[in-house]
Amino acid sequence: MSEHKTIDMAAIQMLDRAKEIGFLTTFDRAKAQEPRCTFGNTGICCRICLQGPCRILPKKPGGNKGICGAADYTIVARNTVRYIAGGAAAHSDHGREIAEVLLSVAEGRVHDYKVTDADKLVKVAKKIGIETEGREVMAICKDVATAALAEFGRVDETKELTWINAYTNEERLNIWRKTAIMPSGINLSLAKLLHQTHIGVDSDPVNIIFGGLKAALCDIDGQHLATDLSDILFGTGVPVVTEANLGAIKEDKVNIALHGHNPLLSQMVVKAAKELQDEAKAAGATGINLVGICCTGNEVLTREGVAIATNFATQELAIMTGAMDAMVVDVQCIMPTLRSAAECFHTKIVTTMPIMKIPGSYHFAFDEHHAVDSAKEIIRLAIDAYKNRDKAKVCIPNIRNKVVAGFTLEAMYNIFAKVNPENPIRVIVDAIEAGEIKGVAALIGCNNLKGTHDHNHTTIAKELAKNDVLLIATGCSAQAHALAGMMNGDAVKEYAGEGLKKFYARLNAVAGLTEELPLMFHMGSCVDNSRCQDLATALATEMGVDYAQVPYVVSAPEAMSEKAVAIGSWNVAYGNPTHVGVIAPTVGSQLVNDVVTKIAEDVFGGFFFWETDPVKASERMVEILEERNWKNAMRKKANDAKEAN
Ligand code: NFS
Ligand code: SF4
C-alpha cells in the first residue's frame, strides 16, 4: 500500500514526483487539516452573523445555544441548506449562461455558435409546450431560450418552473405542491432561502429544510435546461471510444487540458484545435492533444471523444507530468494552487470566466462574439509554452485505459431500440422483472480526501456490478471508473454478475458498436444528472409505479461540493434512496439528521444515508433494490388476484 491516499497508480507516481520537487499537493493539505474540528465536522458551528462563530457546548450553562438563541437543529439546518443554495446557484448560473448564448444564436447575434441538434430542439420545445408545427428552427430556438431565461427572474408565485414541471410525473409534482417546495423562479427561491436563514429569521429546522428542498429543485431545473440547451448547441453525445488517465497526455504533442464545467469556450477550443494543428507542427510538435479534467472534461468527452486526464482530487498532478502546456479553466472545482503547480514547470494557466480568476494566470474573458478567436489565442499561447517545455522535466505515467462513453439517454435508447424498437426503456424493465438485474444505480459526485481518492467509487461499482446492478455514472465518479480501466467491455467480463453479463450480451449482440458496452454508462457531467433522473422517470412511467417504488438508487461515494449536496437533496425529493460516502455535517443535530435520513422517506419515499465503508454501502443499496423489487412483485400479485376475482 502506498503512503498516498489514492488507488490510482498514475497519481501515486505523480505524488512521488511532487514530493521530489517539493510541491505540496491537495493530498498534503488534506493531511495538514487533521485532526478536524468536531464542531465544523458535525455542523454545529455557526458563522452566519458577526457575533459568531458560535459553537454548541451542551455542558456549559448558556452554551447549548448560539448567542442569538439558535439551537443545534437550527444551526445544522441552516448550514445544510446554505450548501444547497450555493450548489443550485452554480448549476443554474451555468445553465443560464448557455441559455444566453442560445438566445444570441436565435437572434443571429453570434457566428461562432449554431443549432447543432435541431431534433433535440424540437423535442425540448414540444416537451415544454412550445408550438413547433410549421415553424422555423430559429423561431423555436428563440422561444426555448426565452423560456429557459424566464426560469430565473420569475416572481409570480402562482407559476411553476417550466422544466421540472415538464419532465416530472404528475403525482410527484403533487407531492412537491403539497409540501410547498415547488419553486416558481430560481433567483426568487435562492434569495428567499438566504433570507430565511439570516440571523433571527427561521428557527424551525423542518421549515428550513423544506426551503432547502425548494432550492434543490431549482438545482435540477437549472441542470436540466443546461443539459438540454448544451445538446442543442453542441450536439447530443453518441458512443465514443477514447482513453483515460495521465497517459493520455502525449510527450510529442502540445497538450492542453480543459478543466471546469461550462462547455461554452471549451467546445470552441476543440474546434480551433482542429484548425491549428499545423501551427503546432511548425513549433516542432506532432500536433495538438486535448485532455479533459472534471466536468468540462466530461462535456467534451461525451460530445467530442476528448480523453480524460484525471478527476478532481488529482488535477494538480496533470501539471506534474511536465508535459502540460496549458490548462484552460472556466468555473467550479478548480484548485487555486494550479497556478503554483504551473510555476514549477512551463505550464500556462488560462482562466476564461469573469467570475473566476487566479492571480498570476492569463485571463481571456469569455465573449460569445469572439469565442473562436479567444480559443485560437489560447491555443497559440499553449504552442508558445510548448517551445519552452523542458524535456528533462517530462515524466508521463505510462497508464491509460480504454474508455467507451458518450451515453446520453438518447444514445442509450438507440441501443435499447435494437432490442425493442417500439419501447426502448422496456429493455431495462424486462430485465428487472425477469430478475436478471436488480435495478439501476447512479454513481455520481466528487472526490473527497477525507477518504482515499477513488477508492469508494471503484469499490462500490465493483460490488454493485457483482450483484447485477446496472450502473450509470456522471461527474468525477464516472471519471474514477474510467481512470481505473472499468469503463469498457473487459470490465463487464471481470466484474459483472451472471445476470448483468447476460443483459450485456443481449445488447452487445445487436448494438452494432465497434466496441463492447462498458460496465457503466457514462451519462455525462454533473449537470447531466438530469439525464439520470430522466431515466428514473422513464422507468417509473413504464413500470406504472411511483418514483419511490422504482428499483433505483443513487450514490455519491466521495461527495465534496455544495453542488453535490444540492443534487443529493433533489434526488431525495424525487424519491430516490441516496447514499453519501462521507459523514454529513448534519449529525450534530439528531433531529435534523433524522429528518433527512428517516422522516424524508415518509414524505418523499427517498432518503439519505451516510456510510463511509464502500462494501457496507453497497450491501445496503442492494438490499434497498431487492426490497423495492419484492414490494413491486407483491403489489402485482395482489392486483392480479383482485382482477381474477
Ligand atoms: Ni460535480 Fe463535476 Fe467533480 Fe464534484 Fe466538481 S467536477 S460538477 S462537483 S468535484 S463531481
Ligand atoms: Fe451565533 Fe446566532 Fe450569529 Fe449564528 S446567527 S453566529 S448562532 S449569534
Image (spheres, rainbow, N blue to C red):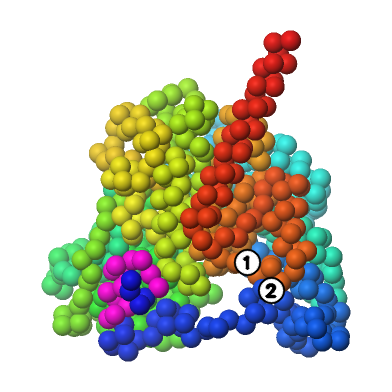
Give the vertical position of 6 relative to 163 (above or below).
below
Is residue 611 or residue 357 the one in the foreground?
611
The answer to whether 407 appears left or right of 167 in the picture is: left
Residue 140 visible in the current orientation: no
Magenta stretch, main secondary structure class? helix
Q: What element carries label 2?
A: loop
Is residue 64 or residue 571 the one in the foreground?
64
Q: How many labels does the image show?
A: 2
Q: Looking at numbered disc 1 in the image, what kind of residue is underneath it?
A: Ala
Is residue 396 or residue 584 the one in the foreground?
584
- Asked if disc 2 is less than 8 Å from ligand 2, the answer is no
Q: Mark 2 or mark 1, which is nearer the start of the sequence?
A: 2
User: Residue 39: image x %, image y %?
Assistant: 68, 80
The answer to whether 375 appears left or right of 160 in the picture is: left
Residue position marked by numbered label 2 in the rendering? 43
Residue found at x 74% / y 83%:
55
The answer to whether 549 appears left or right of 74 in the picture is: left
Give the vertical position of 71 relative to 432 (above or below).
below
The answer to whether 317 appears left or right of 599 in the picture is: left
Q: Looking at numbered disc 2 in the image, what kind of residue is underneath it?
A: Gly
Q: Quadrant of the N terminus?
A: bottom left
Residue found at x 35% / y 86%:
23
- Marks 1/2: CA–CA distance: 8 Å
Residue position marked by numbered label 1 in the rendering? 584
User: Residue 456: image x %, image y %?
Assistant: 46, 61
Q: What element carries label 1?
A: loop
Residue found at x 65% / y 33%:
631
Q: Are marks 1 and 2 in contact (CB under 8 Å)?
A: yes
Q: What stretch is highlighted in magenta?
A: 5-17
